[in-house]
Image: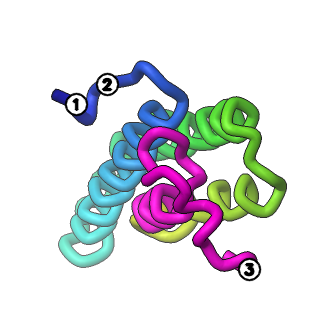
């Protein structure tokens, strides 16, 4: 049985960190609501640090490690890195990477050959 916490391959580690980055984005967005709408000035201090270090920076490092291990081209690596900027973009990228065969065993066999060349 596979779980989200299975870290045995680069693709599985990438998936977990992509989800974690999105969770930290959600926490930061909630904290921003508390700061800007409800007036709690210190609300973003901890979620901001967690997102910056344990979310964003970890995602960047794991992206480069995954790109090297799975031999991603420059375009795929760039798209992965850019996906960390908008909220929940890492989830969108991860789904796209699975669908187009860029995440090894997480993707269906032969799916990269069927993917559009411009994707």
Q: CA distance from mark 1 to mark 3?
A: 32 Å
For marks 1 and 3, the one nearer the N-term is: 1
Residue at figure coordinates x 51%, y 70% from the top left: 86
Relative to 82, is 7 on the left or the right?
left
Pick out the residue farthest to the top. Answer: 8
Q: In x, y percent, where is residue 70?
A: 67, 37
Above or below: residue 119 compared with residue 25: below
Q: Give the SS element for disc 3.
A: loop
Q: Quadrant of the N terminus?
A: top left
CA neighbours of label 2 inside 10 A, class few (<14), some (14 to 19), many (20+): few
- The question of residue 111 being in magenta is answered with yes
Residue position for label 3: 118
Residue position for label 2: 6
In the foreground, 98 or 60: 98
Residue position for label 1: 2
Relative to 67, is 114 on the left or the right?
left
For marks 2 and 3, the one nearer the N-term is: 2
- Determine contact: label 2, label 1, CB under 8 Å: yes
Q: Give the SS element for disc 2.
A: loop
In the foreground, 114 or 85: 114
CA neighbours of label 3 inside 10 A, class few (<14), some (14 to 19), many (20+): few
Q: In x, y percent, where is residue 10?
A: 54, 30
Relative to 64, is 24 on the left or the right?
left
Residue at figure coordinates x 26%, y 71% from the top left: 33
Magenta residues, start to end: 91-119
- The question of residue 12 being in magenta is answered with no
State whether residue 89 appears in this view: no
Residue at figure coordinates x 74%, y 80% from the top left: 118
Above or below: residue 106 compared with residue 7: below
């Amino acid at each position: 049985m596979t779980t989200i916490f299975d870290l045995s391959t680069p693709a599985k580690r990438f998936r977990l960190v992509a989800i974690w980055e999105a969770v930290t984005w959600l926490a930061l967005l909630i904290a921003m609501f508390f700061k800007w709408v409800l007036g709690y000035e210190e609300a973003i201090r901890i979620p901001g640090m967690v997102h910056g270090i344990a979310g964003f920076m970890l995602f960047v490092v794991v992206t480069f490690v995954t790109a090297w291990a799975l031999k991603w081209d420059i375009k795929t690596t760039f798209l992965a890195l850019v996906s960390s900027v908008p909220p929940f973009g890492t989830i969108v990228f991860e789904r796209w990477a699975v669908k187009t065969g860029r995440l090894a065993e997480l993707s269906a066999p032969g799916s990269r050959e069927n993917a559009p060349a411009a994707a």
